[in-house]
Image: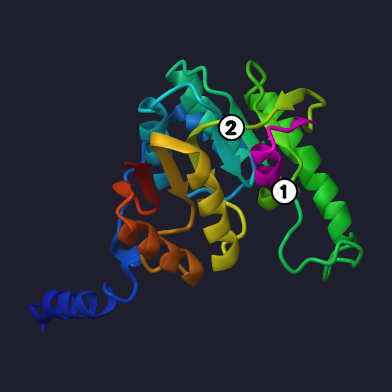
Amino acid sequence: MGGLKPVIKAAIKTVLKPLYPQLFYRPIDISNPSVNWIIYANAGMLARGNLYCFDYAIKNLPSEAPMIEIGSFAGLSTNLLNFYRRNYKKKNRLITCDKWEFQGADREKQMQGLPLSHLDYQAFLKDTYKRNIQMFSSDDLPYTVEMLSDEFFVAWKQNKSTTDVFERSIQLGGPISFCYIDGNHDYDFASRDFANCDQFLEKGGFILFDDSADGTIFEGLGKLMNEVKASNRYELVIKNPNYLFRKK
């Protein structure tokens, strides 16, 4: 009977792996003590495999054009992007955008089971973001613009001057060297974020899509990954398990 166990396990794997590939993939994790100290204290949702993608993209940036992050939440990925930027002594500005408005949330209504409204939650999270950034990126604060990604790219196209959440002036516009897309994961939103980034991403620049691993629960992202691959305008450089592309 014991000899059958490996056979049964192999059969189960053969059946389930095509349906749930994420269950059988072990991403490369380059976490180190410094990264872990940030992760312990900074709230957020992070696929550890993204660290390898951050490191690779930032190490190989094609120019000193800005890096863009769409969706900042509580600042975990922002601080980690800044960590690798600091590690490689890159001069590229890091510019992020978020409005801390969440899909399906009514800002005026009380959150179910909690003594606060979605508006209270939004204000708390924005303040948490600022405190986390000021703690772990105090030597070189990224610029964070309080806009939805569609609003952000309209301002970017117009080369607009604006004020960030730390009350600093910033001139938007120009080429982009790296874009981390972690906003609304519905197809319509994610595909617009990609199209907007694509307009400004320079040759050799990178785009990383969060939650885009094969078998993702976000079907729109899976569809978008197939479209990006089929376009033949981007090279897939890393799948760990999320997709990192380089523009040809």
Mark 2 or 1, closer to the camera = 1
Is residue 76 shown above or below 181?
Answer: above
Residue 79 - label? 2
- Above or below residue 38? Residue 20 is below
Image spot of residue 118 (x, y percent):
84, 60
**Percent position of residue 243, x then y:** 38, 52
Residue depicted at 52% across the width and 22% down the height: 92
For the residues marked 2 and 1, what is the alpha-carbon distance in whole angstroms? 23 Å
Quadrant in which the C terminus is drawn: top left
Q: Give the crowd class for mark 2: few <14, some 14-19, many >=20 residues within 10 Å.
A: many
User: Residue 18 magenta-drawn?
Assistant: no
The residue beneath circle 1 is 151
Determine whether the residue tagged by mark 1 lies in a helix, strand or loop: helix
Look at the numbered disc 2 and give the secondary structure of its residue.
helix
User: Farthest residue toward the left?
Assistant: 3
**Residue at x 36% of width, y 42% of height:** 247
Q: Which residues are magenta?
A: 152-162
Q: Amino acid at mark 1?
A: Glu
